[in-house]
Image (cartoon, rainbow, N blue to C red):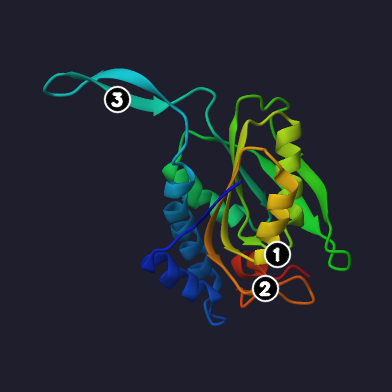
C-alpha cells in the first residue's frame, strides 16, 4: 500500500479553515472542493493514458489522452458527495459510481445501504472519495466491494485520517494495489471513533444535520 500525505501550505491553510467550528456550510463545501482538486493531482499521478497524434498550429506531435476504460470515481455517500465536484473538475471524462455506507455508532461497523456501480470493474482504476478516514471500516468495506467487482487499482482521497484508520486499511488490503492520498494525518481516534482534533462530522458540516 502506498500512502501519500500532502505537504503543502495551501492545503494546510484550507484544512485549518475547515476545522474551525465557525466555518459555515457554504464555505466548507467550497473549500472541500478546492482541497480535493489539489489532492487529486497526486492521486492521479498513475492514471493510465495512451498516445495520440495531434496537429498543433506549427506541426504534428504525439500527446496523451486518458486510456479506455476511463477511471471510475466513487464517492461514499453522503459526505463523499461534497468531494465529487473537486474531483470531476480535474477528471471531467471520468465515470461516476456511488456507494451508500453508514457507520453503526454503537459497533462502529459499516453497512452498505445503496450502490450504483458497473457490475464488471475488470481493468478499472477506481478513485474513492471519503472526507474522513477514521476507523477504516467504511473505506475498507468500499475497497473490498470494488475489488470483488474486479477493480485493478483503488486510490482513496481523504481530507484527514487517523493513524488507526491508516493501519486498518493497510491490514485489510494485503498485496492489493491501493493508494491513500491524505490531506493530513491527525493525532488519534477518541472513544466514540471520531478523529482528534478532526473537524467534526463532515456530512453534517457539508449539508447540515438531518433530523
Q: Is residue 82 above or below residue 97?
A: below
In space, the residues marked 2 and 1 are separated at their CA atoms by 7 Å
Hey, which quadrant is residue 125 in on the image? Answer: top right
Tell me the residue at 42%/48% (across/down). 41
Instruction: Return the residue at label 3.
Output: 63
Residue 195 location in percent, x, y?
67, 72
Tell me the residue at 50%/50% (across/down). 85
Q: Residues within 10 Å of mark 1 (few under 14, many from 20)?
A: many
Q: Is residue 101 left or right of residue 207?
A: right
Q: Secondary structure at mark 1?
A: helix
How many numbered circles are shown? Answer: 3
Instruction: Residue at the far right: name it.
Output: 106
Q: Which of 114/122 is in front?
A: 122
In space, the residues marked 3 and 2 are separated at their CA atoms by 45 Å
Q: Is residue 65 left or right of residue 17?
A: left
Instruction: Return the residue at label 2.
Output: 188
Instruction: Return the residue at label 1.
Output: 164
The quarter of the image holding the C terminus is: bottom right
Q: Residues within 10 Å of mark 2 (few under 14, many from 20)?
A: some
Amino acid at each position: 500500500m502506498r500512502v501519500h500525505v500532502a505537504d503543502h501550505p495551501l492545503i494546510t491553510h484550507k484544512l485549518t479553515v475547515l476545522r474551525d467550528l465557525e466555518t459555515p456550510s457554504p464555505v466548507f463545501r467550497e473549500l472541500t472542493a478546492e482541497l480535493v482538486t489539489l489532492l487529486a493531482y497526486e492521486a492521479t499521478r498513475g492514471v493510465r493514458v495512451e498516445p495520440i497524434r495531434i496537429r498543433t498550429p506549427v506541426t504534428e506531435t504525439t500527446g496523451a489522452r486518458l486510456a479506455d476504460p476511463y477511471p471510475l470515481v466513487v464517492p461514499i455517500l453522503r459526505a463523499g458527495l461534497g468531494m465529487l465536484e473537486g474531483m470531476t473538475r480535474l477528471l471531467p471524462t471520468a465515470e461516476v459510481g456511488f456507494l451508500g455506507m453508514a457507520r453503526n455508532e454503537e459497533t462502529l461497523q459499516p453497512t452498505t445501504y445503496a450502490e450504483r456501480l458497473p457490475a464488471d470493474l475488470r481493468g478499472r482504476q477506481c478513485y474513492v472519495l471519503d472526507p474522513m478516514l477514521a476507523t477504516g471500516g467504511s473505506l475498507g468495506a468500499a475497497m473490498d466491494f470494488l475489488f470483488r467487482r474486479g477493480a485493478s487499482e483503488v486510490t482513496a482521497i481523504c481530507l484527514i485520517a487517523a493513524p488507526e484508520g491508516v493501519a486498518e486499511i493497510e491490514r485489510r488490503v494485503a498485496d492489493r494495489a491501493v493508494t491513500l492520498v491524505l490531506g493530513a494525518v491527525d493525532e488519534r481516534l477518541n472513544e466514540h471513533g471520531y478523529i482528534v482534533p478532526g473537524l467534526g462530522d463532515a456530512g453534517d458540516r457539508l449539508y447540515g444535520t438531518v433530523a
